[in-house]
Image: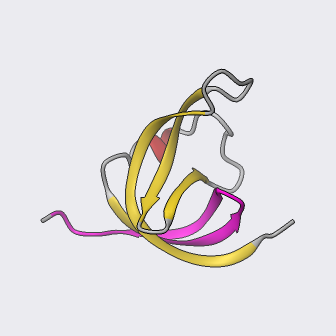
Amino acid sequence: MDQIDAKLAGTVVRVHYSPGSKSDHMAVMLDTPKGRYKLRLPGGGAFVDPELDKMVGQEIEGVGNVTGNLFILKNWTVAPRR
């Protein structure tokens, strides 16, 4: 498993994830200059997490673990709105 500590910044978006598969759902993801990462909180739901839903549309900087395209947020800050 390629789990690494990471610091990523970007916009939290909701997108259609894995269409046509068993994992097909609207996912909360972090859109960064380096790519898009599916967000999870430790102990949070894989498909639905009300805490992540609140972050959609915000610019954040997060610290956590990356495995493939999954970013498990340990801590984050929200950028002030411009």
Q: Nearer the viewer, residue 74 or 71?
A: 71
Residue found 57% across the figure and 52% down from its top: 39
**Which quarter of the rendered picture does the N terminus lie within?**
bottom right
Where residue 48 sits, quadrant-wise, is: top right
Q: Nearer the viewer, residue 35 or 3?
A: 35
Where residue 63 sits, quadrant-wise, is: bottom right
Colour scheme of the rendered structure: secondary structure
Residue 54, given in percent of the width and then of the height, sits at 39, 44
Image height check: is 51 above or below 69?
above
User: Going by the image, does 78 lie left or right of 70?
Assistant: left
Residue 19, given in percent of the width and then of the height, sits at 60, 26
**Which quarter of the rendered picture does the C terminus lie within?**
bottom left
Task: Decide whether residue 15 is among the magenta residues.
Answer: no
Q: Nearer the viewer, residue 36 or 42?
A: 36
Residue found 17% across the figure and 63% down from its top: 81
Image height check: is 48 above or below 78?
above
Residue 70, given in percent of the width and then of the height, sits at 66, 56
Where residue 21 sits, quadrant-wise, is: top right
Residue found 54% across the figure and 70% down from its top: 75
Residue 37, given in percent of the width and then of the height, sits at 56, 56
User: Going by the image, does 79 lie left or right of 8?
Assistant: left
Q: Specify the principal SS of the magenta part.
A: strand
Residue, far left: 82
Image height check: is 66 above or below 18?
below
Residue found 46% across the figure and 37% down from its top: 15
Q: Give the range drawn in magenta.
A: 62-81
